[in-house]
Amino acid sequence: MIDLGKYAGTVLAAYGISVLLLVGLVWHSIAANTRARRALEKQEGRKDA
Amino acid sequence: MSIWEYANPVKFMRTSGAILPFAVAGAVVCTVGGVVWGFLTPDDFRQGSTVKIVFLHVPAAMMAINIWVMMLVASLIWLIRRHHVSALAAKAAAPIGAVMTLIALATGAIWGQPMWGTWWEWDPRLTSFLILLLFYLGYIALWASVEDVDSAADLTGVLCLVGSVFALLSRYAVLFWNQGLHQGASLSVQSGERMSAIYRYPLYLSMLGFLLLFVALVLIRTRTEIRRRRLAALQAREMRA
């Protein structure tokens, strides 16, 4: 285990917030893209029908 | 073949679809590799383990400024040549830039508390970064508040030009005003390397990772915007029929 010494809370808080924000951004980007792709496929399916 | 061919949405979707898997793989390998490598580096003799924050703080700050520059270029292409993909790429980049600015500010505040004895100081670089974040939020809000896509692209394009002053100010604030708490550049071509190789190489990897992460995310988000625009066009056509 890595010993972060007296600044353990500081380092872990910085990493925790950054990872949380980055994962949230990636998740939001992928989810929005999936929603848009499905909606477009559905609309194009209606157009072709 | 001209670069303007990529302004065609069909061509952009095809090309970005081919590039995306490589950008995603590169982003994952470099970001995770750089950050984990950075986390495992030894403590600095002055800053202790807080030095590990540099592997998130510097790449995020670098991207916060450069994403606005990318948005500026894309906005200028829209304003001059009226290519829709460039306007949508600028729109797609803004939330990524806002998150990068937020990470830079948050990690800076957390780092500043033990090192400077304060979470926040109205220092030139910190203040210009806060204004940059407000510009990002204003830019996103402006896109959301204007219904017509072309009008929204025009207005946000102008806002992007104005905000570029603060993006540049964020980069050079330390040089303009010397009284701030924030130090100068840790990595500089002109003044040579000021950072030990133990920290420099994982930092380079992390910076490359953040850059590739931006490329992957901006491609995904631009593809989303193109699909939304196509969907809106199909729905409008259906309503008219």
Image (cartoon, rainbow, N blue to C red):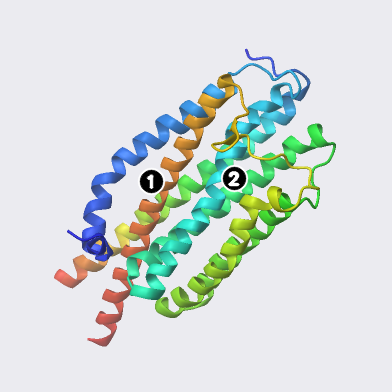
Q: Nearer the viewer, residue B201 or B136?
A: B201
Can you name the residue that lies furthest to the front here?
A: B190
Q: Quadrant of residue B181?
A: top right
Residue at disc 1, secondary structure: helix
Q: Which residue is mark 1?
A: B216
Q: Chain of mark 1?
A: B
Mark 1 neighbour class, 10 Å CA radius: few under 14, some 14 to 19, many 20 or more: many
Q: Amino acid at mark 2?
A: Ala
User: x and y percent of residue B154 in the render?
Assistant: 46, 77
Mark 2 neighbour class, 10 Å CA radius: few under 14, some 14 to 19, many 20 or more: many
Q: Amino acid at mark 1?
A: Ala
Q: Chain of mark 2?
A: B
User: x and y percent of residue B80 in the render?
Assistant: 38, 74
| Residue at image coords 63%, 34% | B186
| Residue at image coords 25%, 59% | B3
Q: Nearer the viewer, residue B14 or B4?
A: B4
Q: Which residue is mark 2?
A: B61
Quadrant including the C terminus of chain B: bottom left
**Left or right: where does residue B125 sit relative to residue B214?**
right
User: x and y percent of residue B100 in the render?
Assistant: 56, 48
**Left or right: where does residue B109 sit relative to residue B168?**
right
Q: Nearer the viewer, residue A6 or A45?
A: A6
Residues at marks 1 and 2, CA–CA distance in whole angstroms: 18 Å
Of tags 1 and 2, which is closer to the observer?
Answer: 2
Q: Is residue B86 above or below residue A32?
A: below
| Residue at image coords 37%, 55% | A33
The earlier-in-sequence mark between 1 and 2 is 2
Can you name the residue that lies furthest to the bottom here?
A: B240
| Residue at image coords 45%, 36% | B208
